[in-house]
Image (cartoon, rainbow, N blue to C red):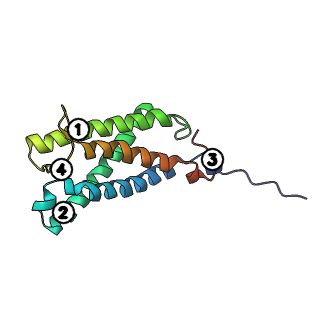
Amino acid sequence: MTAAAPAPSRTATRPDWLTVLRRYFLFSLIGHLLWEIAHIPLYTIWIEGTVGEIAFAILHCTGGDLFIAFSTLLLALFALGSGDWPRQSWAPVLLAAVVMGVGYTIFSEWLNITVREAWAYRDIMPVIPVIDAGLTPFLQWLVVPVAAYLGATSRLSWRGITRG
């Protein structure tokens, strides 16, 4: 008598959405933390703040970035995701999350620099004409979410399973 081969697990046939969300969170955390550390010298806190204030700003901003990253991804999933996500609908979900993240960043930079005066750019911060938003926050919301999303859904993450 021979034993029947075990049925393939769900993750052997397609990525599990919960695992993708967990990986997206981890990749976003790492990406946004590194980005915040790298571009904080472009803000006035770098020359006016204490080491403690700078460290708090990095952690505070990274936490906000994670909230924005997850909020935009979940909104994109609600609007454009399918029951077979991430195998299906991954491109429209990613595009919508990035557009919302960039849009929120432009609004937030305007609100916190112009209206609230909560933070300020140093003269060395490249600024995008017309919208007067810093180039590095804008690029952050193009690069980090895309890298985190692709990392969370990559073939390497699934041992050879394609993103679909």
- Residue 107 falls left or right of residue 115: right
Residue closer to the observer: 92 or 54? 54
Are the two marked residues, 3 and 4, in contact with CB atoms closer than 8 angstroms?
no
Quickly name the residue at label 3.
161
Q: Nearer the viewer, mark 3 or mark 1?
A: 1
Query: Residue 55's x, y, as percent?
Result: 21, 65
Tell which circle, 2 or 1, labels the residue nearer the N-terminal end.
Answer: 2
Q: Measuring 49% from the left and 50% from the top, which residue is drawn there?
A: 152
Q: Are marks 2 and 1 in contact (CB under 8 Å)?
A: no
Can I make out residue 48 in this image? yes
Q: CA distance from mark 1 to mark 4?
A: 19 Å
Q: x%, y% of residue 23?
A: 46, 54
Q: Which residue in the structure is indicated by mark 2?
A: 54
Q: Amino acid at mark 4?
A: Ile
For mark 4, give the secondary structure: loop
Contact, mark 3 vs mark 1 (Cβ under 8 Å):
no
- Disc 1 marks which residue? 106
